[in-house]
Image: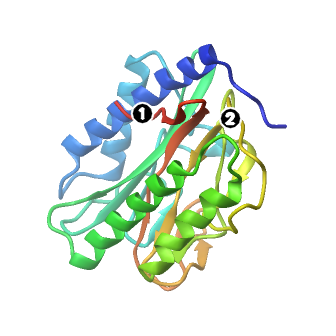
Amino acid sequence: MITIKNAAEIKKMREAGRIIAEVFELIREKIRPGITTGELDLAAERLILRRKAIPVCKGFEGFPAATCISVNNEVIHGIPGQRVIQAGDIVSVDLSVSKDGWCADAARTFPVGEIAPELAELLRVTEMSLYAGIEMAQIGNRLGDIGHRVQDIAEAHGLGVVRDYVGHGIGREMHEAPDVPNYGRPGRGLRLVEGMALAIEPMLNLGTAAVRTLPDGWTVVTLDGKFSAHFENTVAITAAGPEILTVL
């Protein structure tokens, strides 16, 4: 069932989203060659707890960490641990936070030092596609308008759009209805109304869109081994247009 949020509930989600944005600023400061993904995760969790919030990913269906950290050809759901980040890597950090019973969810892909030009372009286009999709999150539009806009930009730049995983509604739970694909046909799908909250999250690959899950049961990687980027924001659909809740 799709839940419609009122202004007070969106305010609570905005508070959770601000904590996520603070985590991203912390990650941006800390990420460097030689640090481990586990160290980044610990720093993120400590900040979330200091804000008296809950790291939703930790324990979700058995996931062991506060954040998902995916490196290079890892698309999503990477498990933080002893992996040492290297110069030239790209590192995707995805997390959800609950504050006073309301959730927000977002992801960013960070370059580590100087990265290859094709990787810089991958990050640029993935982030651009996210914001283009968000622009379509208007009252009266349809879900297909969001997905089509993301897909159009990605494919115009020769990138693969991951179809196995999609965005989603969000509110009291991290994952709520509806699904929000990063592909689709304009004018098709659920009509958007005021008070919906959506997590829009393009996952774009340098090569094929195909992915597989590693034996750990969580980490999703590109089938061809090429690199992937992931950007996500939680967005409220309002009378004034889409409001991004996961920024400072």
Read off the residue under disc 2.
196
Residue 138 lies left or right of residue 25; in this view the side is: right
Depth-wise, is mark 1 or mark 2 nearer the camera? 2
Residue 33 lies left or right of residue 15; in this view the side is: left
Q: In this orientation, does residue 217 appear?
A: no
What's the distance in space between the residues labelled 1 and 2, CA to CA?
Answer: 20 Å
Density class for disc 2 (Cα within 10 Å; few <14, some 14-19, many ≥20) is many
In the rendered image of this protein, does residue 247 appear above or below residue 14? Answer: below
Q: Is mark 1 on a helix, strand or loop?
A: helix
The percent position of residue 33, horizontal first and vertical second, equals: 18, 58
Read off the residue under disc 1.
20
The percent position of residue 87, horizontal first and vertical second, equals: 18, 66
Amino acid tagged 2: Met
Q: Which of 165 and 57 is in front in this view?
A: 165
The percent position of residue 35, horizontal first and vertical second, equals: 23, 51
Q: What's the residue at 51%, 64% (across, down)?
A: 203
Q: What's the residue at 61%, 57% (across, down)?
A: 146
Residue 34 lies left or right of residue 59; in this view the side is: left
Q: Is mark 2 on a helix, strand or loop?
A: loop
Query: Outermost residue, left direction?
Result: 114
